[in-house]
Amino acid sequence: MELSSRLMRFNEPETLKMAKLGRELRAQGIDVIDLSLGEPDFDTPEHIKEAAEKAVEANYSHYTPVAGYLDLREAICTKLKRDNNLDYKPENIIVSTGAKQSIANLVMALVDTGDEVIIPTPYWVTYSEIVRMNEGEPILVKTSIENGYKITPQELEAAITPRTKLFMFSSPNNPSGCVYSQAELAGLAEVFKKHPRIYIMSDEIYEYINFVGGHQSIAQFDFLKDRVGVINGLSKGYAMTGYRLGYLAAETTIIKACEKLQGQITSGPTAVTQRAAITALTSPLDSTHVMVAEFKRRKERVMELLKQLGVQCSEPDGAFYVFPVISSYFGKRDGDDVINNADELCMYLLNKAHVSTVTGRAFGEPECIRISFANSMEKIEEGYKRMIEALSRLS
């Protein structure tokens, strides 16, 4: 059978690949510590689970509107006003089966063959591949660790061409943990003001996992708001990855386009998840604050442990990853194992230390690896102990 050429345009996510390899080793009885995790290791809060149970009992088991229940979209608007001081109406919201689908919808609605999409590195692995799936051209703008892996207005301006259609970024960032300040976003907004054809995707899924203060959205600038698609969801801030619900807030033309696309692919997210989402979005964030405090405690310990690895790493201001530069290990060997790049270092750590991480190449930074701290402190301590021991054998 001859498969579609579309499958040759993009790659399997390295994050999912490493999780799969880790599961295969566990199936062989090997104790693998997973530091590739891209999800909180916490359980969904009880009050949200109770809302899901009540939805089942109330027979929320039928098809939902493609864009989502009206009262859920109203709850999202309430959340955006409460937490971000952003004014949206229900017609500005579409809910999808995870934030990943929200991103895919937006890219499909905007990007035509040959359109350029600016993506600062490092970036979440799926951004570039969704662009390629839709025959767009990812323009990867390399940022610097000295600038905290944040794109500057000058770098943004230099990357713009007449073919630029979309700019995609996240704050807090996966994988670097960088968080853009209001002043930094204002600088980017001034560049976009000069280029009215460019649309902006602002991925804010890690909004609550922020160690430096209040979250800032680039949609706050009135002159830019109608050109911003705000992506968010339940997975990270509410420990609800398996519930699969994300949302897009945008101008109504974009929302209608995404609804048209989604109507031919999945229709609306599951009814029970939507009812649980209303409770999540409108309840106090006490459980989220407890989770974030623990992430911050782990982050501080991880920064101490990284010193023993002898690597350069910017301290993350959000999310739950560190993204160290590990190129100092390139060219070293342990017997027959030679480390030529980040991919090989990750495989070495998996096979010799039995610790799973993710290559930085997948995020656009081939001299780095991503290490998650979304695991227990006990597992983190043991994981770093194993990595330090394995890396000490390289010479």
Image (cartoon, helix red, strand yellow):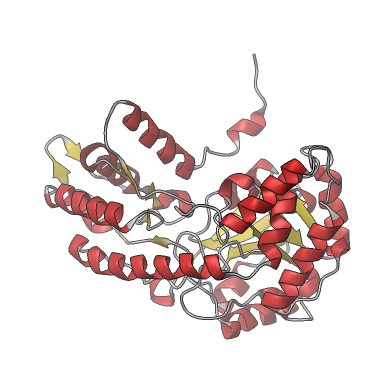
Residue 229, given in percent of the width and then of the height, sits at: 73, 64
- Residue 269 visible to an observer of this rendering: no
Q: Position of residue 214 (x, y in %)?
A: 57, 80
> Which residue occupies the foreground of this view, 302 or 238?
238
The spot of residue 272 in percent (x, y) is: 73, 45
Location of residue 320 in the rendering, given as x and y in whole percent from the top left corner: 44, 62
Q: Residue at x 53, y 65 (%)?
A: 287
Return the residue nearer the eye: 211 or 393: 211
Let me know if residue 171 appears in the view: yes
Q: What residue lies at 62% left-to-right and 74% top-to-bottom?
A: 157
**Residue furthest out toward the bottom:** 183
Q: Quadrant of residue 270?
A: top right
Q: Is residue 281 left or right of residue 222?
A: left
Q: Quadrant of the N terminus?
A: top right
Q: Quadrant of residue 106?
A: bottom right
**Could you tell me how many numbered marks the image carries?**
0
Q: Image point 88% across, 62% down: which residue?
A: 91
Q: Quadrant of residue 280?
A: bottom right
Residue at the far top in the pictured view: 1
- At 79% from the left edge and 80% from the top edge, which residue is drawn? 223
- Relative to residue 203, is residue 151 depicted above or below? below
